[in-house]
């Protein structure tokens, strides 16, 4: 996914100023795509220059607020991107590398505190997603946009559940006082 496509999607959902768009990113889109305010404003300029969005004329005011909307060319570009094949991206998480390094150095128990901290963070995120689900997806909402938004949220719910299960298993596998597994020599290199 790329930032231009995230912005086009958000603007199709609701024309917005740059400030409104950054607030919407902070409230919802950030759960699956992050961007700084500077990146969003820079990309709005590029999208406007490329003829994919335009600033909607606003009544005169003291500020220089621009509200953007998607042009037909932007909708076409987004629709084309949706159908492009894209392979899954490999996981690139420093925690996984740190656990592998701990196995190689025989210091797995030292990661217990960090694994517990991550576990707490994932549990909190899961609760936040559950609250969003209760608030935004009551039974009976059957329109296409609601169904697809709910599927996106369900991906987040599933990922958090996976991380919680994995972190609990990782903690149980740690040697010594940090985990519950008995101390044993590090395995031979190889495997994932």
Image (cartoon, grey):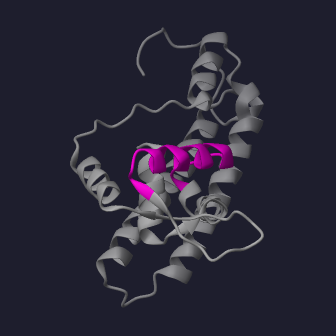
Magenta stretch in the rendered image: 31-53
Q: Position of residue 89 (x, y in %)?
A: 38, 34
Give the residue at x 58% y 23%: 97
Of 9 and 184, which appears nearest the observer? Answer: 9
Please tell me whether residue 168 is drawn above or below residue 10 in the rendered image. Answer: above
Q: Position of residue 183 (x, y in %)?
A: 66, 22
Q: Is residue 101 left or right of residue 72?
A: right
Give the residue at x 59% y 49%: 40
Magenta residue check for 142: no
Give the residue at x 32% y 53%: 78
Quick check: can you spot residue 153? no
Give the residue at x 59% y 43%: 42
| Residue 151 position by quadrant | bottom left
Q: Position of residue 83 (x, y in %)?
A: 21, 50
Please tell me whether residue 51 is drawn above or below residue 188 in the rendered image. Answer: below
**Quadrant in the picture for the C terminus:** top left
State the predominant SS element of the stretch in magenta: helix
Q: Is residue 157 left or right of residue 128?
A: left
Q: Position of residue 110 (x, y in %)?
A: 76, 26
| Residue 171 position by quadrant | top right
Of 84 and 54, which appears nearest the observer? Answer: 54
Q: Is residue 51 left or right of residue 164?
A: left
**Quadrant in the picture for the N terminus:** top left
Quick check: can you spot residue 166? yes
Magenta residue check for 36: yes
Residue at far bottom of view = 140
Please tell me whether residue 123 is drawn above or below residue 168 in the rendered image. Answer: below
Q: Is residue 72 left or right of residue 139?
A: left
Q: How many marks?
A: 0
């Amino acid at each position: 996914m790329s930032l231009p496509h995230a912005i086009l999607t958000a603007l199709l959902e609701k024309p917005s100023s740059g400030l409104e768009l950054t607030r919407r990113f902070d409230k919802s889109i950030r759960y699956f795509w992050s961007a700084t305010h500077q990146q969003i404003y820079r990309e709005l300029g590029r999208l406007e220059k490329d003829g994919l969005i335009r600033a909607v004329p606003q009544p005169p005011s003291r500020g220089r607020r621009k509200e953007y909307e998607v042009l037909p060319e932007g909708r076409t570009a987004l629709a084309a991107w949706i159908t492009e094949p894209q392979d899954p991206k490999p996981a690139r998480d420093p925690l996984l590398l740190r656990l592998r390094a701990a196995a190689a150095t025989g210091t797995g128990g030292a990661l217990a505190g960090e694994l517990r901290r991550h576990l707490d963070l994932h549990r909190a995120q899961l609760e936040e997603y559950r609250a969003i689900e209760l608030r935004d997806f009551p039974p009976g909402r059957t329109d296409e946009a609601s169904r697809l938004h709910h599927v996106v949220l369900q991906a987040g719910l599933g990922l958090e559940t996976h991380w919680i299960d994995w972190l609990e298993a990782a903690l149980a596998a740690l040697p010594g006082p940090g985990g519950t597994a008995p101390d044993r020599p590090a395995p031979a290199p190889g495997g994932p």
